[in-house]
Structures are given as C-alpha cells and as structure tokens.
Image (cartoon, grey):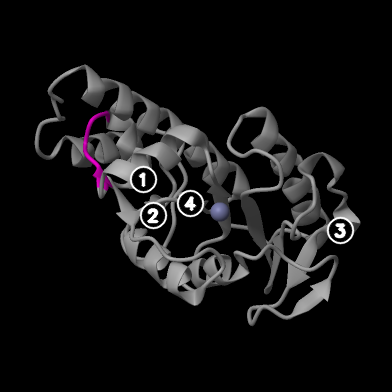
Amino acid sequence: MGELPLADAKALICAFGRRMITDRLVVGTSGNISVRAHDMVTITPSGVEYAELAPAAISVVDADGRLIEGEPPSSELPLHLALYGTGTHAVVHTHSPHATAAGLVTDEIPPIHYLLAMFNGPVRVAPYATFGTEELAAATTKAIEDRYGCLLANHGAVTIGRTLEAAYDRAIQLEWLCQVWLTAKNAGELRLLPDGELDRVNDRIQHYGAAAREPRPRQQEQRDL
Ligand SMILES: [Zn+2]
C-alpha cells in the first residue's frame, strides 16, 4: 500500500466523519475515526461536530500520541493507537444502534451470514471498560485479534482496515449484520452457516474478489474486501 499524504488523510477524516452522521453510525459528536499517514496518525478531534470538521482541526499525533497539529484528539486515542500498534492502517469507532444493542446481549455474533467473512470470522464482543481508558484499548485489541472488527460491550463497535474506506465499509456491514442477527434471534431459532463455510467464502474472495492481490490475512496483516 502506498503512503497516504497528510493532506489526503485529513480530507478523508472530514469526508468519512460527515458520512458517519448521514449513515447513522453515530449521533452528535460520538464515535471517532482515524487513518495512518506515514508515521503519524490523523484522528477526529475531541468534541467537534462532524458537520463542522475542517482539515485544519483534524488532530495529527505521533505513534506515542503526542499532538503534532490540529485540535486535541478524540478521547479514544489510546484505543486507536493500540490498534495501530498491531499493524492496522485505519480505525472506525461507531455507536451504531444495532451493533451497540447486540453488544448488550451476546459475547459474539455467530456465523449467521457469509458476509462475516469480511471480518475473518464471527465477531467478538470486548468486555466493558470505561471509555478512553487503556483498559478499553487492551480489551478491544484482544477481541479484534485475527478479525477486522469487534463490538464493545455496552458501548459500540470498532472496525479496521488497510484503508479508511475499507474500515468504514466494515462499520456499515457490521451494523447491518447486527440488525439481521437481532431480528432473526427474536423471530425464532437461528440457523447458522455450515461448519467451515466462512473459510470457503474467504477462499472464494481470495480467488475471485477485489482482494485477489492481497495476502491471506491471519495475525496482523490486514486485508481489504
Ligand atoms: Zn465510543
């Protein structure tokens, strides 16, 4: 992947920040997004309305979280930095309603639909910890291991990707999957995918999908679908 210029990273944060509102992934100033640019991280500032986000306000921090440019960063900076420490390139954190609701009632979104292959398997729920804490950052990093997203109990959702576009698309898909799961589980007994089906879907995507040139993901290396 090519390096993202800082100006492009800031513009992406502004654009996807606005989409967070129109796509109903967050309300008000909740949620936050970030993308890596060289050895810096650009992230939404703390407490700024998405509609008013301008490139000059976007927080630019170094790998240790020191503010280099812009407004003070989101309070979830520790969570974002922890995920960059595992080799990701972009992070989207939402409070989307169905993902948040699912995180109240389960420890995992089971293999209900082949689109869970976008997450490399069933999506786990990180145990609750107070927002903005290193404890939440650690719980999230553990829950998202070998995955491209997780839910945060009693809080929301986190998705990651090689690009902000990919992480954002996963946030949309995760919200949809949680809505489907909640609806189905309240309607009757769930029928899950056959064993091994998500791996078969992954293989098909590797062969035929847009990700054909991406390496097979496992630990830290991230893939886009
Ligand atoms: Zn949050």
Q: Which residue is mark 3?
A: 57
Residue situated furthest top in the rendering: 187
Q: CA distance from mark 2 to mark 4?
A: 22 Å
Q: CA distance from mark 2 to mark 1?
A: 31 Å
Q: Earlier in the sequence, mark 3 or mark 2?
A: 3
Q: CA distance from mark 1 to mark 3?
A: 32 Å
Q: Earlier in the sequence, mark 2 or mark 4?
A: 4
The amino acid on which the numbered mark 3 sits, given as a three-letter code, is: Ala
Residue 46 point in image, percent of width and height: 74, 60
Say whether residue 3 is left or right of residue 70.
left
Secondary structure under the numbered disc 4 in the rendered image? strand
Residue 52 point in image, percent of width and height: 86, 44
Secondary structure under the numbered disc 2 in the rendered image? loop
How crowded is the residue under tag 2: few (<14 C-alpha within 10 Å), some, or many (20+)?
Answer: few
| Residue sitting at x 62%, y 68% | 77
Q: Which mark is residue 158?
A: 4
